[in-house]
Amino acid sequence: MTIKIENLTYIYSPDSPFEVKALDNINLSIEDGEFIGLIGHTGSGKSTLIQHLNGLLKSTSGRIFIDDVDITKKEVKLKDIRQKVGLVFQYPEHQLFEETVLKDVSFGPKNLGLSDDETFQRAKEAVELVGIDFELIKDRSPFELSGGQRRRVAIAGVLAMKPKILILDEPTAGLDPKGRDDILGQIQNLYNSNDMTIILVSHSMEDIARLVNRIVVMHKGTIAMQDTPREVFKRAEDLEKIGLAIPQITYFMKELKSRVQNIRDDVLTVDEAKEEIIKFLRRHKNA
């Protein structure tokens, strides 16, 4: 399911003293099956952009196509779009409200008018997709769970709608290291095992470098750059000028290269760095 954004502009509080142009003539295409990382400093327009993709915000001007359907048109049924485009906000567990996990995850499918059997099956599949034993948890209150489990249950509630596009806005915010790793692992599993397009909004350059196929960098409501993680993070100075950074391990490798020369400095993850250092040591030993 493709996304095409044409000349998208959005102004908060137009024609008032509080007028702010949050998006300024955005043009962006996302192909079916891509894993996109959306980065930018606070106020760059990331959250405003993703809220346009399932019709939560209506553009000031411009068009958005989801699978060739212009969702900015008045006659478009946004309910249909929101079944295809699942949006998980920061702290989605704050939106849990039912007395059991099953009822909470079933809420969306039930509102689609699905049968009880189909609703139950969707809830079961969604909970298992996020790595939780359905039978063990289905009758428990979501408020009895750990923070990481509640976050996963909230994501399951979106997955139960069977979206083709999943948008996650800072999905690890506020979690402890284990909960954070669990969530990121499940997101990676979702992408690997499902025919799904994922857009991940994150401030963690390490997470973005490890997970996504392409990075879109936003700055002052515009797209400042977009490319593969390796190409984007080569532009450390440009990123730093707009208040961003590159992964810490990449900084480390750049410093190492300044001292030993014959080593790659465009690595993005700890595993890549380990492999490169081992190769360097072997070359040095055999020299």
Image (tube, rainbow, N blue to C red):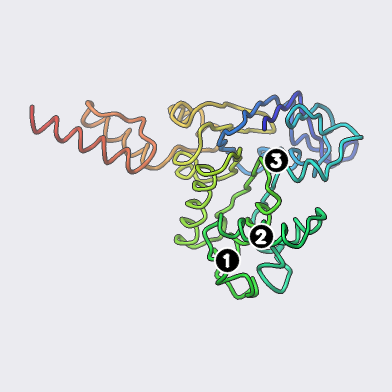
What is the three-letter code of the residue carrying label 2?
Ala
Instruction: Return the residue nearer the eye: 245 or 65.
Output: 65
Instruction: Decide which of tag 2 and tag 3 comes sooner along the chain.
Output: 3
Residues packed near mark 3 inside 10 Å, few (<14), some (14 to 19) or many (20 plus):
many
Up-down relation of residue 15 to residue 91 (above or below): above
What amino acid is labelled 1 in the image?
A: Phe
Q: CA distance from mark 2 to mark 3?
A: 25 Å
**Percent position of residue 90, x then y:** 65, 54
In which quadrant of the rendered image does the C terminus lie?
top left
| C-alpha span from label 1 to label 3 | 30 Å
Residue 50 is marked as: 3
Seen at 39% across and 42% down, the residue is 248
**Residue 123 place in picture, x, y as percent:** 66, 60
Image quarter where the N terminus lies is: top right
Mark 1 or mark 3, which is nearer to you? 1
Q: Which mark is residue 134?
A: 1
Chain-order first, disc 1 or disc 3: 3
**Image depth: mark 2 or mark 3 in front:** 2
Q: Amino acid at mark 3?
A: Ile
